[in-house]
Amino acid sequence: MPTPPETSPAPVTVAHIKDEAELMQALAIREVVFIEEQHVPEGIERDAEDAHAYHVIAYQGGHAIGTGRLVKLPEAPAGQAGTWGQIGRMAVLQAHRKSRVGSLLLTSLEEEARRRNVSGIMLHAQLYALEFYKKHGYQPVGAVFDEAGIDHLEMHKRL
């Protein structure tokens, strides 16, 4: 009996969030990951930066599965020069983790930072994600700190 052809998963695409409906999809992903899974208070997870951040969203098979954002920092981190951005609110739904979705989101945000002539990226990495960010060229800076009840480490990358 012949074996059925293998079906590969639909490709993942990453797009800039252009309207309120897409932003609501991104916020729904963040609610699942940060508020429900990690118990981050909603008042901390959603902030004023959302209004002017550059947001991206990952889709697979027409379904929103991940998101992240880029914010221009008002000044460079201590000891750094130039224009810096901060990547944050990186979230991928549990069923899609470990499948390169985070890498696609991060790469998309870094590409936008380059288009905006940002010379470096700063982010606050949860400790479980340190190796992910190191693989993408980020270096740890300083000591572990608490953010929303979760241990984080600041990381930098020059673009």
Image (cartoon, grey):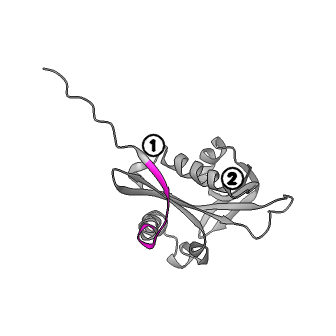
Residue 72 lies in what quarter of the image? bottom right
Where is residue 3? Give x, y as percent: 19, 24
- As helix, strand or loop, the secondary structure at mark 1 comes to loop
> Splitting the image into 4 quarters, where does residue 68 fall?
bottom right
Residue at 87% of width from left, 59% of height from top? 79
- Identify residue for label 2: 114
Q: Quick check: is 146 in the magenta stretch?
A: no
**159 left or right of 43?**
right
Stretch in magenta: 13-22
Residue nearest the observer in this picture, 19 or 55 = 19
Q: CA distance from mark 2 to mark 1?
A: 25 Å
**What's under tag 2, amino acid-wise?**
Arg
In the rendered image, residue 94, in percent from the top left (x then y), is placed at 41, 54
Crowdedness of circle 2 by 10 Å Cα count: few (<14), some, many (20+)?
some
Residue shown at 41%/53% (left/top)? Answer: 59
Of marks 2 and 1, the one in the foreground? 2
Q: Can you tell which mark lies on residue 56? A: none
